[in-house]
Amino acid sequence: MKSIRIRGARTHNLKNINLDLPRNKLVVITGLSGSGKSSLAFDTLYAEGQRRYVESLSSYARQFLQLMAKPDVDLIEGLSPAIAIEQKATSHNPRSTVGTVTEIHDYLRLLFARAGDPYCPEHDIVLRAQSISQMVDHVLEMPEGTRIMILSPLVVERKGEQLELFDELRAQGFVRLRVNGKVYEMDSLPTLQKNKKHTVEIVVDRLKVSAESKQRLAESFETALRHADGRALAVEMDSGKEHLFSAKFSCPICNYSLQELEPRLFSFNSPMGACPKCDGLGNISFFDPKRIVAFPQLSLSSGAIKGWDRRNQFYFQMLDSLARFYDFDLERPFESLPDRIQQIILYGSGKEQVPFSYLNERGKPTLREHSFEGIVHNLERRYKETESPTVREELAKFLNNCACTECRGTRLRLEARHVKVADHAIYQLSALPLKQALSFFQKIELQGNKQAIAERIVQEIVSRLTFLNNVGLDYLSLDRSAETLSGGEAQRIRLASQIGSGLTGVMYVLDEPSIGLHQRDNSRLLDTLKRLRDMGNSVIVVEHDEDAILAADHVVDMGPGAGEHGGTIIAQGTPDEVCANSQSLTGDYLMGRRSISSPKKYRAPDPERMLVIKGASGNNLKDVTLDLPVGLMVCVTGVSGSGKSTLINDTLYPAVAQHLYGSNTEPAPYAEISGLEFFDKVINVDQSPIGRTPRSNPATYTGLFTPIRELFAGVPQARERGYGPGRFSFNVKGGRCESCQGDGVIKVEMHFLPDVYVDCDVCHGKRYNRESLEVQYKGKNIHEILCMTVEQAHAFFEPVPIIARKLQTLLDVGLGYITLGQSATTLSGGEAQRVKLSLELSKRDTGRTLYILDEPTTGLHFHDIALLLKVIHKLRDQGNTLVVIEHNLDVIKTADWIIDLGPEGGMGGGHIIAQGSPKDIAANPDSVTGEYLKLVLAKKI
């Protein structure tokens, strides 16, 4: 079958569509945000492909798989088993790294176990395990007639008189010992000083090297090894030269030993390999004095330490007793107290007893004398002892993380850290950027049979590293924690892993793989997608990127609008056919019939109004000075991994939030900050979900639901019945349906099939009880209001300014198609970000806000971007400052000011390469972004 035939698809907002998609081709589905792209690609094609494959498995296997709901479609033919590669973060498990997710770490562990050389941590010498035959051969290589002594080292550099040892050796029949380098007969041994270190070795044999002494040497070595735990020493008697041998991986100098190398030793997820102090996490949590003393400028009585001020009588009376004993003033600012007093308050009085006065239940003082444990130790004890999740969560606010002091963040135990391949330990290779790691393994040369052993393993590592580099992830390292990856990075890692798996005959469904990717890396990503196609797979991509659309074999343009106005196919065919279609909004933008225009004139920065951060050096930043013009739209650009997120999300935002709100989040290292007087608020509009439960929705998040409930409570019928606003909440008892507790659906667990959610048979999916639904406003009950789209609700509530204004802001950010009661868990990252943006837009504005937006164009069509830019420019026109991290050139060209980081990703980045207006950047030969910006500006649009 040459095509995938879809007939009568009605999933979500799809309008009974019929579609034929070519198999084993690169198909791009595009269209406005909310037009039904994901409904077609993920909820119809992928869901059905996965369902059919899983149904071929046994019922036992099916119960372990998470299944999707059956799509509403009449017929789909020509489907292959489906794999979805979405934008979700890979893992929230702190043990997952890029290396473990891609399985490269497994190959590294195997390489180090089979071809690694263990070293002594103290003496840095290779530990070699030798057989007795190898030891004998080594001695026989000496010139014939060489006089040698075979010794068994029993005690190496240890204190003590060793009297018991001497008696034991006499009883065993040994004749001579070498003590501290000198040979003695057993009846004339020296008296050893108890407090000095000594070395004691048994003289097992003395002989001349000859071919006939082979058997004698073997027996002598066997005796020496048996007594000295696998170690032996051959000393040339004339020259004094010593030859150390070990039957184990052990250091002949300090007796440090190692068992046989195996892959588990190099796994930080195994007790055998994990650092015992941090359990393989690489960092440890500790109660941070900076977080505990949140307001050092205040006194202890005024709240320098939360929970230990006058309002908390129990703890404050302890501080009061301390103050009397050590003679300090509780009304004095904490930061001005002597260092010794600060240390006692935080870490305790040690063994010193302090008289404490407590008020008993009757309010009478009682005296008790004991040491003071210190606030830090008090919090540590309570954190360990409590069984209350609430208390634990409250105390966790004072916790901070730092690299483990034992393994220094490498996660591995001492033994694993000192095994090397080609002079590199496993943690050193894991810390290399993937580009350097690839270069290392392409050139690696090992000695002897290790080269042959390692060859296949190295091939697999090189293959996987090549794919990761090809999808633009060359700046990441294998030890990078998976939970710190962006959605786009996580998706491209999975994409690289799929290519590495070499599957054919599969249908891959991808969700905007170009997110977070600089224009420079786009061609490499597209080559990867084509390679996946050429392996005999159908590749279906939901994408808005111009390059991806033009590189497709087949394009499907959804529309014409969003939500209920979408769900139909406007145009399909080759990119040229879609571009030529006058009905296609995508074609209009690709052909230039419509465009996002550049401003005729860029606003110049005022040198007197700048927010300046000096000496930013977090992650890969190289002592960067950030000059941010106030009151402008500033785009921060640069190739992936150049340091944009570190500079803005990890340094700028927490630093400003700390100064404005006393935020606990510690910014990345920087020297100084100035220009904060221009701001009274900082808002980070990111793509994290607006709620983690299905009960959260756009109406509750934006604050719309409160005035709507108040409106219903004011209806005459509600007033007669005494209903307040709480009656119309589905989260509290009273007005909600108690059968489904306001969910509207009841979950039916099906052990061998996906869980089924059926409408509640009491409220029929309406979430409220009959009495609540009888109350109507303008002919609509509360359930019908929640089912309205933002667009419908705006027309309905137009006479109510407080509601209409909030709805207008949702319309302004292009979310007219979502329903007020839509579950927050069904919103994409881009939609969640725009809901947050609309909430900020609806607030009263002082014109002194710093907005930070991280890739706000995620999931947006050209037309949606034009709408978003209007909102961004409106905020700027009110006097606010907007910092936008972005790769989309249509957004970058409309910025007033651009800060371009680079020149490369990872350790090759971390510098500000260029800054200025878009025209300045386009003219800068050092800026990679400028190269592409020049082409966009040359279109004169």
Image: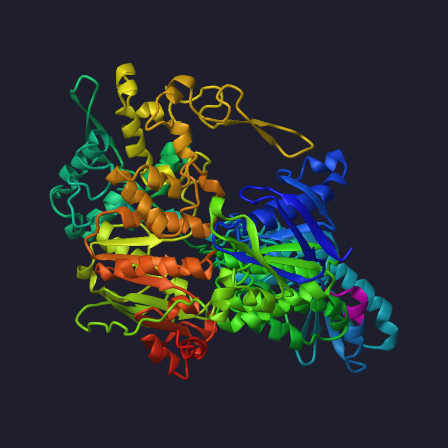
* Callout count: 0
What coloring was used for the rendering? Answer: rainbow
Which residue sits at x=41%, y=84%? 925
Q: Which residues are magenta?
A: 127-136
Depth check: give the residue in front, 158 or 885: 885
Residue 934: x and y, percent? 42, 79
Q: Is residue 930 above or below residue 792?
A: below
Asked which quadrant contains residue 353, the reply is: top left
Residue 443: x and y, percent? 65, 77
Depth check: give the residue in front, 70 or 532: 70
Q: Give the left or right position of residue 46, taking residue 671 as reference.
A: right
Residue 584: x and y, percent? 52, 60
Q: Quadrant of the N terminus?
A: bottom right
Depth check: give the residue in front, 539 or 609: 539
Q: Quadrant of the C terminus?
A: bottom left
Depth check: give the residue in front, 194 or 23: 23
746 in magenta: no
Which residue sits at x=23%, y=64%? 631
Which residue sits at x=64%, y=38%? 70
Asked which quadrant contains residue 931, the reply is: bottom left
Q: Is residue 343 above or below residue 353?
A: below
Which residue sits at x=33%, y=52%? 665
**Quick one: which residue is furthest to the top in this view?**
721
Q: Give the left or right position of residue 927, taking residue 309 as reference.
A: right
**Quick one: which residue is furthest to the front in this view?**
582
Is residue 125 in view from this perspective? Answer: no
Is residue 394 in view from this perspective? Answer: yes
